[in-house]
Every structure is written in C-alpha cells, then in structure tokens.
Amino acid sequence: MGTDRFRELLSSPSYRTRLLASLSLGWATLQTARFLLPPLLPRIQADLGLSAGAVGVALTGFGLVYAVVQYPAGVASDRLSRPSVLLPGFLVLLAAIALLGLSVAPAVFVVAVLLLGVGKGLYASPSRALVSEWYADRRGRALGIYSAGTDLGGIAGAALAVVVLATPGWRLAFLPVLVVLALVTVLYAAWNREPYRFGRVPIAVGATAGRVLATTEQRERLVAFSLFYFAVGGIANFYPTLLVTVRGLPEGLASASFALLFLVGLVVKPSAGAASDRFPRLLVSVVGLLVAAGGLALVLVGPGLAGLAAGTVLMALGYKVQFPIADAVVLEAAPEDDVGGDLGAARGAFLGANALGPGVVGLLAEVSGYALAFWLLAATFVASAVLLGRQYLRS
C-alpha cells in the first residue's frame, strides 16, 4: 500500500475500529473451536475409537504445528502484506472446523486438528502485527482487547459444550463456530483496503535470530516470557485436575473454577494492556507475575473455598496481564519492516515452551504429585519476574 493511502486509512478511527473488531472476533471464534475440544474429547474418542495416546499425539501435533507456522507466516506478512496471509488463514480455519464437524474416522479427526494448528499459526502473528501497526499509540490496550478473544472463546467453548453434551451427538457443536467464522471472514474481506500480494518469500532464519537475540536484554526477555508460557501450559491443562486431586473439589466445581480464569482474563487483558501503555510495561509485567505466584500459592494452601476462590482470581489476574505485554514488548523491539517475522519467531519460542509445560507437569505429578508440580509453576512465575525486574531496575 502506498504511504499516502496508508496514512489516510490510519487516520480513520472507524476503519481501525472495524479492523480491530473483525480480527478480535476472528481470534475469539477460532479459540472457541480450540476450547470445544477438551470437553468433547471423551465423546469423540468413544465415537471414533480413538485411544488416549492417539488424541495426545494429535493435540501435541496441533501445538507444534501452531508454533512452527508462526515464523514463516509472520515473514510472509512482512514481505507481501498482512491480508495476503490473513485471508488464507481464515480459509484454512474454515476448512479445519468444517472437517472437525465431518470427522467420521480417526484419520479425518487428526488431519482436522493439525489443519486447525496451521490455520491458527497463519492467523496469529500477522493479525497481531496488524493491530500493533494500526494502534501504535495505544498498542497495549488494542492487543489486550484482541487477546481477550482467547478468554471469550474459552467461555463460549465451555458453554457450547455444555449444551451439546446434553444431546446424543457432538458434531453439531462446530456448526455455529463455522457460521460465525464464515461471517467474520466475509466482513474482514469486505472491510479490508490493503492489497493482496502473492509470490515466493525468502525465509532468512539467521537474520531473524540475530535481531531477536541481538542484545542481552532481548535474550533475557525471551527467556522470561518463555518461562511464563511454560507455566501457563501446565496450568491450562491440569488446573481442574489439581483442584480435584489435591483440594478435593467435585468435578463440576473444579470446571467452574477453571472457567473463572477465562472470566477474569476477559476483563483484565484490555485493562492490563492500557496500564502498560501508561506505565512501564516491564513493571506492570513483574507485578502481575508476582501476583500470579502468590495466587497460585493461595490455591495450594489457602483455607477452604474462600481461599481457593481468592487464589484463583489472583492467579488469573496476575498471569492474564502478561499476554498483551509479551506481544507489545517484542513488537516494539522489531524493525518496522520485520515486525511480523520477529513476532512470529518469538511466539514460536513462547509456544514451544508452552507445549513443554503439560509434559513436565504430568511427569512430575506421576512421581511426586500435582501439588509439587504446581509449586514448580509458582516458582517459574517468580523466576520470570526476577529476570524482568532486573531489566526494569537497569533501565
């Protein structure tokens, strides 16, 4: 897009608002599909004859594909245009969700899950880079609104699963998600005014790594936020199990406590992003990480349901703060022409660490129990806070 045309669009609040709304709703919708899977898995396994191991391999593959696609998608969006990657991402997601609803054999389900990872990878970095460009003056708040789509998707997925599980089937659960995402795709395509360009894109891994790891500060931030994502990977997959096995909660109450994490995130992320625009981002991040560690400790040892509820809210309040800040910190350090690629590379590292979290927690829980595993996650929050706090004090 020509510079004059870009500035003209950038100065239009209505265009920016429509863009942010369509991308945020797209993210929330694809996350709804993602969070539909866990509650439906027992029924899917029984219907398709999938073993627990096969499901585990499929979900691990989803996480790895999602992480790997981040970088080339980001680079392509830098060299071509953001819409040139986003629109194919929408189309791949539509195909994946349709295929999930049409799964009649294990192989079809596995392909659909992997395709969902590809589509999500194509969508994640270019959409964040685009939001960052349009809202450079309020980057934290805009990314907070966008990333709150994860929590909205988590709530919607849980609610939709409750409705569907009251019926004999499970495939129809994906139909409303498919319809909403198709509508968002049409709206984005209709509202977008940036060009579509297609062609071969060189992937300069060495140059990107040199930029992302250029300074001690950047390397420390990458490690710090990777530690954070590692902890979140453990919490997101095993928090209800912790509440059932360690705190003795019924499964229904444990699920409600898990949903509380999403409700808190829906409120906190935009506010946290706005706070990081006003105050130093690293300071806001450090405070959040310490609050998360304290909340998790309260979950583990707090008295009764009141202590457990307070700990859950505090933990969510602290760790949900980090998502818009982590993206904003990477985006601000990247050169203007390489924003998507640098963000994709950094997010690939974050998501790789995130994928390790469940494995480590599961292995440690087998040896020493879930309580010790979650104390390790609390310590990981503190270690991340120490790294970022040291940087803040040096700045």
Image (tube, rainbow, N blue to C red):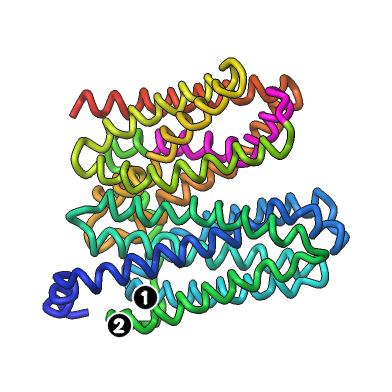
Q: Residue at x 38, y 42 (%)?
A: 268
Asked if residue 140 can be seen in this view, the reply is yes
Residue 119 at x, y = what percent?
Answer: 54, 67
In screen coordinates, is 164 left or right of 64? Answer: right
Query: In this orientation, which residue lies closer to the viewer: 337 or 130?
Result: 130
Quadrant of the drawing holding the C terminus? top left
| Magenta residue span | 222-249
Give the residue number, with chain letter if any, for mark 1. 83
The residues tagged by marks 1 and 2 sit, at their Cα atoms, a distance apart of 7 Å
Taking the spot 86% from the left edge, 63% from the top edge, the residue there is 47
Identify the secondary structure beneath mark 1. helix
Residue 140, percent from left and from top: 27, 49
Q: Residue furthest left?
A: 4
Left of 122 or right of it: where is 281?
left
Instruction: From the image, tell me which residue sits under label 2.
Output: 195
Earlier-in-chain disc, 1 versus 2: 1
Judge by depth and name the residue closer to the eye, 89 or 27.
Answer: 27
Residue 185 is tagged as: none
Residue located at (39% from left, 67% from top): 23
Q: Is residue 210 visible?
A: no
Of the residues shown, which amino acid type is indicated by label 1? Pro
Going by the image, does 250 lie left or right of 145? right
Q: Is residue 184 magenta?
A: no
Asked if labels 2 and 1 touch by Cβ distance under 8 angstroms, the answer is yes
Instruction: Tell me which secondary structure the magenta stretch mostly adopts.
Output: helix
